[in-house]
Amino acid sequence: MTWRARLAELDIALPPVAPPAGSYLPAVQTGSLVYTAGQIPLVDGTVAATGKVGAGVSPEEGQRLARVCALNALAAVDALVGIDAVVRVVKVVGFVASAEGFTGQPAVLNGASDLLAEIFGERGRHARSAVGVAELPLGVPVEVELVVEVA
Amino acid sequence: MTWRARLAELDIALPPVAPPAGSYLPAVQTGSLVYTAGQIPLVDGTVAATGKVGAGVSPEEGQRLARVCALNALAAVDALVGIDAVVRVVKVVGFVASAEGFTGQPAVLNGASDLLAEIFGERGRHARSAVGVAELPLGVPVEVELVVEVA
Amino acid sequence: MTWRARLAELDIALPPVAPPAGSYLPAVQTGSLVYTAGQIPLVDGTVAATGKVGAGVSPEEGQRLARVCALNALAAVDALVGIDAVVRVVKVVGFVASAEGFTGQPAVLNGASDLLAEIFGERGRHARSAVGVAELPLGVPVEVELVVEVA
């Protein structure tokens, strides 16, 4: 089954590529790797939520937003090389805007990781770094970037 | 035109390579990729500014400092492989020491991105992540790292 | 001398691979590169310390913890491809949970960098980014990730 068929099977629609918030590209290929830009939870061109996880934003909501970020990252990969070119997901880096004392970044980022596993199975399993940062662009609670191996 | 000629045309001089602030190298090549160290706004060996963007440092000043970081990163690439070996810029990660509530990291990082576009044109367009962090080495407001594809 | 013999000579034992704190893998190979997950200072499955450097955690303790993180990262590389496959260390990114005003991230990260130099000599010298973040998973003071070139 192609990844596109798998997406259809899961009833997951890749969103339009989120326009970059500055003078850069949503994704770039070099050799067999695609690096995405850090993706924020934009839905239909507007931020799905703002605030910090552990304060105004619950960990569960953060997890849902991390999933949106990952979907946006896959949309960027798809627009660049076609989703069916994905060989495997290599790396995820996730930044969580964190209230003082919030240390549950891994559970938040599972929203992204679980989506990748759901779609790509073993090929979706990746190395990951999760950190809690002070502030994110436009006040969003989560930002996710991917490195993906492509054919 | 070579990139070196392009730099001359733009009247941009690459600075001396900034000495690492610890036991590491300014840049390393693996295959066709060069990874730079995180570059801070050192000018002539001293930090050009300290403080947080959104508090003591304005976004415009942050943008200017991001440009200095990118210049230092290019100096590191040049010293390692020669600037004319650059095939394209792949990825920029920018860390902005951010005061509480400052969410304009993308505009700050445009200082780096715009410089790369100015020099390398289409080959300078890259994927980018911008995050707001609590503190940066030596108290600088901005740190920028590059991944560059080289011949 | 193999790297494994070098480890024995230095009396350094690689720990068991730390279990991921979420739905991801400790390390992934793509082509000649291995990306590790962000490693935290887990020792025997429990966090070696919590808190922020510059407040409850001293820079010297942070440095020691960064070394533990790097050892955990090497354990992940070893489990995936065998430590003797390492050609060189390419990149280190280090995140330091930093108290307000703490800007000594480079010295903290030297705990990781110096270990890599001790084991791999010139092949251990890498590009590095060090940043001070708000919070880290499980409240640890340091997180370190590696990109390593392998044969």
Image (cartoon, coloured by chain):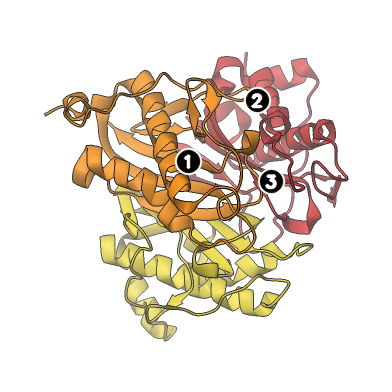
Chain colours: A red, B yellow, C orange
Is residue B91 visible to us here?
Answer: no
Up-down relation of residue A70 to residue B124 (above or below): above
Q: Which residue is mark 2?
A: A116
Kind of residue sitting beneath label 2 = Leu
Kind of residue sitting beneath label 3 = Gln
Q: Residues within 10 Å of mark 1 (few under 14, many from 20)?
A: many
Is residue C37 visible to us here?
Answer: yes
Marks 2/3: CA–CA distance: 15 Å
The answer to which of marks 2 and 3 sits earlier in the sequence is 3
Viewer-nearest of discs 1 and 3: 1
Residue furthest to the left: C1
x, y (%) of residue A141? 78, 46
Q: Residues within 10 Å of mark 3 (few under 14, many from 20)?
A: many
Helix, strand or loop for disc 3:
loop
What is the chain identity of the residue bearing mark 2?
A
Q: Which residue is mark 3?
A: A39
- In the image, what residue occupies the spot 33% across and 49% down? C126
Helix, strand or loop for disc 1:
strand
Q: Nearer the viewer, residue C18 or A84?
A: C18
Q: Which mark is residue C144?
A: 1
x, y (%) of residue A131? 62, 42
Q: Nearer the viewer, residue A110 or B86?
A: A110
